Amino acid sequence: MSAYPDTQLFIDGLWRDGSNAHLSIVNPASGEVIGRVSNAGGNDLDEALSAAAAGFEQWRQVSAFDRAKLMRRAAEILRGRTADISRLMTLEQGKPLAESKAETMGAADIIDWFAEEARRAYGRLIPPRATNVRQMVVKEPVGPVAAFSPWNFPLNQAVRKVSAALAAGCSIILKGPEETPASCAELVRAFADAGLPAGVLNLVFGIPADISGHLIPHPVIRKISFTGSTAVGKHLASLAGAHMKRVTMELGGHAPALVFDDADIDLAVRILAAAKFRNAGQICVAPTRFLIQERVFEKFLDGFVKAAEAVTVGDGLSDGITMGPLANPRRVEAMEALTADAVMRGAKIATGGKRIGNLGNFFQPTVLMDVPRDARVLNEEPFGPMAIVSAFSDYGSAVAEANRLPYGLAAYAYTTSAKTSADLARDIESGMLSINHHGLALPELPFGGMKESGYGSEGGSEAMEAYFNTKLVTEAIN
Ligand code: NAD
């Protein structure tokens, strides 16, 4: 078994255990317990809150120029530790090592981008109605943040929140993913080793509902950021609403991928299959409902099934693996239940549909067809390696299906028609639309949803805005 460290809490600049009993960490490729994570109790959370309050008073005084320098140092540290961190990530989360490396390097790029953005957080001067009046709009950090990040991208989901908060001058308590804690802890270690003052960034793990129930209502916390399921998001948003806290919610999706009969079908198959099976489909923006125009349906299905069957499933640490296990047994159970429900309603399995072996959480890359609209998988986010391929006749019916669900996170389209592209840009109800390529999630691009996929953004300058208060200062100069 490869070495995997126990993970501790990081509170007020110190690594230490929490007062509750540890939680076990399981390697999803083997089912073996590989380590443990500390579990914060109420007293630990109170200490984190005091540290974040004091840390904020200190960090807000640091100039954007110096905040940016420190953040860039953390990014370099992270880059230098990529090999070790990505191994930890694959051990605890399951994704192929190449994906873990890309995530770690990508996290460093996200830090760099927000570091630079910190220096461009301009306010503005508004022309007054009287010559002796000056009107200034000033951006101020909103205050200590409580952030909740999930297990599917242990670094990437956390780094977006941490970087934007720190860049804006906020302190932060991060509840990291309790099932995949070690790589997330390495992110925090990189900032600590870069010289971030104690209390500015605190990391806790534990029982999610206990932690959110303690932190969100607490008066020290001024802003909440959550990535996870829509059901939990709604609960946390109402808790935040009851205490009038600012909120960013990055929730579930059920992304449609529309392929029109004028599209480059080979390109669509290649890019969409890679996007579907990356991270074993456990991605909020993964394409899920594949809507293919009738004339090219057979060609697309044939190519896509071949691409699914070419995916090499196995332990993410082994060479040549292109899809690892699912991150936890809940996802395998969900894949089995969704498949059984669809088949019971008349769906056909074009390929896959079964778990692989009894060791670890492996599931076959799966393509379903003839799935009736009331099947659960066409309504609930599968969050796994499952594609549902359906045919459509015309633009109107494709867009109606794409917009049918309460989700509105990502959408994809393949067409060579400029008119179709322009129409889709207007008609598709989603926070992100990527046409003829897979172009989401760069740090400089807004990343977020509409409808029940949440609100606010985790990328681009919009992500910084979420961590600022806007203050008007108007002054009569006599
Ligand atoms: P879940 O809904 O129990 O948990 C999802 C995430 O929310 C986890 O990180 C968990 O720690 C956190 N969480 C749960 N209850 C919480 C609470 N009361 N307070 C604070 N945080 C809480 O489900 P799960 O089995 O871990 O994941 C399954 C579903 O979650 C997926 O089907 C998917 O829809 C969604 N999910 C979405 C993303 C995303 O990137 N948007 C990431 C992970 C999971």
Image (tube, rainbow, N blue to C red):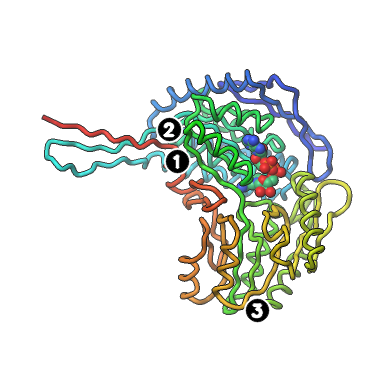
Residue designated by label 1: 466
Distance, label 3 to label 2, CA atoms, is 51 Å
Q: Which mark sits nearer the N-terminus, 3 or 1? A: 3
Q: Label 3: state its secondary structure.
A: helix
Distance, label 3 to label 1, CA atoms, is 43 Å
Amino acid type, callout 2: Val
Beta carbon at label 3 within 8 Å of ligand 1 = no
Residue ID at (54%, 48%): 454
Q: Which mark is residue 294?
A: 3
Asked if the residue under mark 2 is in contact with the one under mark 1, i.e. CB atoms within 8 Å, the reply is yes
Residue designated by label 2: 142
| Position of 357 relative to 171 (above/below) | below
Quarter of the image for residue 6 reads top right
- Tell me the quarter of the image containing the N terminus: top right
Residue ID at (59%, 26%): 214
Asked if the residue under mark 2 is in contact with the one under mark 3, i.e. CB atoms within 8 Å, the reply is no
| Position of 451 relative to 123 (above/below) | below
Amino acid type, callout 3: Glu
Amino acid type, callout 1: Ala
